[in-house]
Image (cartoon, helix red, strand yellow):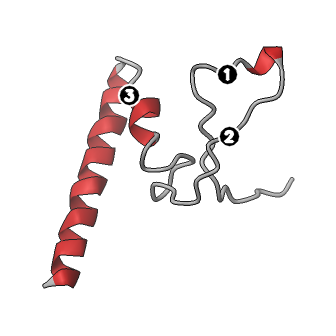
Amino acid sequence: MVDIPIRECQWIGPEQDPRKGPIHYCGSTHLWPGRAYCVDHVWRVYAKGTGINNKRQIKAIEKELADLKDMEDMEDA
């Protein structure tokens, strides 16, 4: 089996039901680093659950965002 890297956002949205017909992915190529979703949809995916693991994932994403912002600020300076 070969792993194919994900290059487009995999968000299908809550209005689509894969059981009722073809689905359409978001398709954005501006992915959150290490995720299968774009920066607009990553929050919707990981903010839905309330489990402990989900809260850890949200904190990890928030830390990644803060680190990326810090790196951008250093590059701009």
Q: Quick check: 27 left or right of 55?
A: right
Up/down of 57 relative to 17, above or below: below
Between discs 1 and 2, the one toward the N terminus: 1
- Residue density around tag 1, few if under 14, some if 14–19, many if 20 or more, within 10 Å: few
Q: Quick check: 20 left or right of 11?
A: right
> Marks 2 and 3: in contact by CB < 8 Å?
no
Please identify the quarter of the rendering in which residue 15 is found: top right
What kind of element bears circle 1? loop
Amino acid type at image mark 1: Gln
Expressed as whole percent of the image width and height from the top left, the position of residue 32 reads 45, 54
Residue positioned 60% across, 48% down in the render: 9
Amino acid type at image mark 2: Tyr
37 or 23: nearer the viewer? 23
Q: Quick check: 68 left or right of 17?
A: left
Between discs 1 and 3, the one toward the N terminus: 1
Q: Which residue is mark 3?
A: 54
**Which quarter of the rendered picture does the C terminus lie within?**
bottom left
Q: Which residue is mark 1?
A: 16
- Structural distance between the alpha carbons of marks 1 and 3: 23 Å
Expressed as whole percent of the image width and height from the top left, the position of residue 62 reads 26, 46
Seen as rendered, the residue at the extreme left is: 77
- Structural distance between the alpha carbons of marks 1 and 2: 10 Å
Picture disc at residue 25: 2
Between discs 3 and 2, the one toward the N terminus: 2
Residue positioned 68% across, 40% down in the render: 25
